[in-house]
Amino acid sequence: MTSYISNSEKETINIAHKFASSLKKGDVICLYGNLGVGKSVFARALIRKLTNNPEEEVPSPTFTLVQTYGDNIFHYDLYRIEDPEEIWELNWEEAISDSITLVEWPERLGYLLPNKHIRIDITQSSDMIQRIINIRAINEQKRKNR
């Protein structure tokens, strides 16, 4: 696991930029954290770095559920889905097979969460000023269905 401390939005952006250089097609990045903790800031910075466009318009997919960038970046916000099966209607199979896929609220995937993914936990420090960003690769051998 790799851990970072961020003291500002700018530092969070720099951490996301550094992390972006390690990604490749087929990677699924799952962002965990409470509302307002900085998941969207991290995702936006990551996408801008991956598209090599610091001005890329990166709206939150809260209402559309998914935004795509180019041919190989999918950004999901699953806060509003109620059943994991809904993901199939959002090009999930394509996204996880040949793209870089970012998922906010991945716990909504339930048993459909890929066994192999990169888990990023973003939490606030007790003083509510700093963000703690923990990044670790997950490679589970088996997962129970439903």
Image (tube, rainbow, N blue to C red):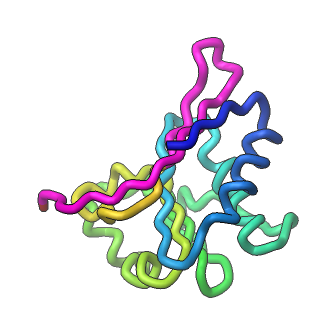
- Asked whether, in this view, residue 140 is left or right of residue 55, the answer is left
Residue 106 is inside the magenta segment: no
Measured as percent of width and height from the top left, residue 24 is found at 58, 74
Residue 137 is inside the magenta segment: yes
Residue occupying the point 37% across, 55% down = 138
In magenta, the rendered stretch is 120-144
Residue occupying the point 48% across, 84% down = 98
On screen, residue 32 above or below 112: above
On screen, residue 106 above or below 6: below
Residue lying furthest front: 1
Which of the two residues, 26 or 39, is positioned nearer the viewer here?
A: 26
- Asked whether, in this view, residue 8 is left or right of residue 25, the answer is right
Residue lying furthest right: 55
Measured as percent of width and height from the top left, residue 118 is found at 46, 57
- Asked whether, in this view, residue 143 is left or right of residue 109, the answer is left
Measured as percent of width and height from the top left, residue 70 is found at 67, 83
Which of the two residues, 6 or 92, is positioned nearer the viewer here?
A: 6
Residue occupying the point 72% across, 47% down = 15
Choose top left, top right, bottom left or bottom right for residue 86. Answer: bottom left
